Image (cartoon, helix red, strand yellow):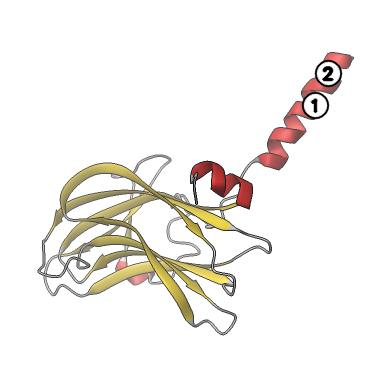
Amino acid sequence: MKQLLFFSLLFLTTITNAQTNLVKNGGFESELLNWRGEENAMISPYEKKSGKSGANITQFVGAEWKAIDQIVSIPKNTFAVECSVWMKTDGVETQSEAYKAAAVILEFTNAGDKQIVSETIAQAKGATEWINYKKTIKTPAEAKKMRIMLALAQTNGTVFFDDVKITTLTEEDYLKLNPGQ
């Protein structure tokens, strides 16, 4: 009986400490549900990091901004967030400006939806295999929402995305990940 009680408590502790992904449908298992700009992307059952599908953005000519995005609310008492995305590129052209690339951008906004700060999580050109880009960012005090953008930023080529995650961190968790800050 004591063993059952111990394992039950251990299981409950594990569940309550599990970090919740703030991004809905970050694995694209429900196609582009919850993502805006679905006309700019496609679902691929062939190019994926995990699960049954991933998303991709392709552009052959024009070098326009093509992206999908999702806006999420920041839970109260969030000290920082960790953003993690798997990205793969194929034939992404190099442009003279560095920002013109396959990219993942996280934008913090205030209650009036005005941008406070924008952070680049990932940027790639050429052809790459699947790479997990991960960045921990302190949440600005006045931030109420975040917008995650998965983009082919004013260049041509193909970019694939999968397993998009944003999790919240306490100050203690942040300091463990970023000692000396």
Q: In this view, does 4 lie above or below 54?
A: above
Q: Helix, strand or loop at disc 2?
A: helix
Total tally of numbered discs in the picture: 2
Q: Residue 8 carries which label?
A: 1
Q: Is mark 1 on a helix, strand or loop?
A: helix
Q: How far from the left and from the top, in percent, is residue 45?
A: 33, 46
Quarter-of-image position of residue 22:
bottom right
Relative side of 178 to 125, left or right: right
Q: Position of residue 163 (x, y in %)?
A: 43, 47
**Quadrant in the picture for the N terminus:** top right
Q: Mark 2 — residue?
A: 4
Q: Mark 1 and 2 residues: CB-CB less than 8 Å, in contact?
A: yes
> Distance of mark 1 from mark 2, alpha carbons?
6 Å
Q: Which amino acid does label 1 sit on?
A: Ser
Residue 77 in picture, x, y percent from top left:
68, 61
The percent position of residue 59, horizontal first and vertical second, equals 18, 66
In the rendered view, tell whether residue 178 sits above or below residue 106: above
Which residue is painted at 11% across and 70% down in the image?
Answer: 61
Question: What amino acid is at disc 2?
Answer: Leu
Residue 103 in the image: above or below residue 114: above
Q: Which residue is at a point 11% across and 61% down the rendered structure image?
A: 93
Nearer the observer, 172 or 10: 172
Residue that protrudes farthest toward the right in the picture? 1
**Within-10-Å neighbours for mark 1: few <14, some 14–19, many 20+:** few
Kindly tell me whether residue 46 is visible in this rendering: no
Query: Residue placed farthest to the front in the image?
Result: 180
The residue lying at 47 percent from left, 76 percent from top is 116
Q: Which mark, by number, is residue 48?
A: none
> Can residue 143 be seen here?
yes
- Binning the other alpha carbons within 10 Å of mark 2 as few (below 14), some (14 to 19) or many (20 upward) gives few
Q: Could you tell whether 76 is left or right of 29 in the image?
A: right
Residue drawn 50% across the image and 43% down it: 177
